Image (tube, rainbow, N blue to C red):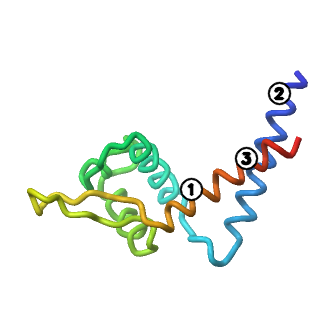
Amino acid sequence: MANNSKFSTTYLRFLNLIQAIRDIPSFPAMDPVEERLLNMLAAVWHGGKPISVLEAMGLSSDISATTAHRRLKTLRSKGLIALDVDKIDSRIKYVVPTELATQYFATMGQALDRAQKAD
């Protein structure tokens, strides 16, 4: 039972750190769908696989393709993703992270690390 309490405390500490980070004016504001889509993209990028816009639109079964496409546009306008054109077929565009996205993931990782070390 004590172990569960430790994990609960760590998780709550992490949530508090995340909220504090989100309140920083220079931090990119995202709605929950944008954040979820960006996190799903991160999992694909981490695997080293390129992901096309069409594939990104179908990442989640509970986010419609239209909504995903709109959110990809807003993530692009916020500077969190960019599009690279395929070298062979110019109709295919790949979603790639920007430096801002890399900083976002690093900040989230640091928050998780801090939450775990605060014991």
| Secondary structure under the numbered disc 2 in the rendered image | helix
Q: Residue furthest bottom?
A: 25
Kindly identify the residue that appears in the image at 44 percent across and 72 percent down: 79
Q: Looking at the image, which is closer to me, 67 or 74?
A: 74
CB within 8 Å, label 2 to label 3 = no
Q: Earlier in the sequence, mark 2 or mark 1?
A: 2
CB within 8 Å, label 3 to label 1 = no
| Secondary structure under the numbered disc 3 in the rendered image | helix
Assess disc 2: are there few (<14), some (14-19) or many (≥20) residues with their C-alpha within 10 Å of its C-alpha. few
Q: Position of residue 81 (x, y in %)?
A: 40, 64
Q: Which mark is residue 105?
A: 1
Q: Which amino acid is tagged 3? A: Asp
Spatial distance from mark 2 to mark 3, Cα to Cα?
A: 18 Å
Q: Is residue 13 left or right of residue 79?
A: right
Q: Residue furthest top?
A: 1
Q: Position of residue 98 (x, y in %)?
A: 43, 65
Q: Position of residue 22 (x, y in %)?
A: 67, 66
Q: Is residue 96 left or right of residue 7?
A: left
Q: Looking at the image, which is closer to me, 21 or 98?
A: 98
Q: Quadrant of residue 23?
A: bottom right
Which residue lies under the disc numbered 3? 113
Which residue lies under the disc numbered 2? 4
Q: Which amino acid is tagged 2? A: Asn
Q: Point out the frontmost of discs 2 and 1.
A: 1
Q: Looking at the image, which is closer to me, 83 or 12?
A: 83
Spatial distance from mark 2 to mark 1, Cα to Cα?
A: 26 Å
Q: Which amino acid is tagged 1? A: Phe
Q: Quadrant of residue 11?
A: top right
Q: Earlier in the sequence, mark 3 or mark 1?
A: 1
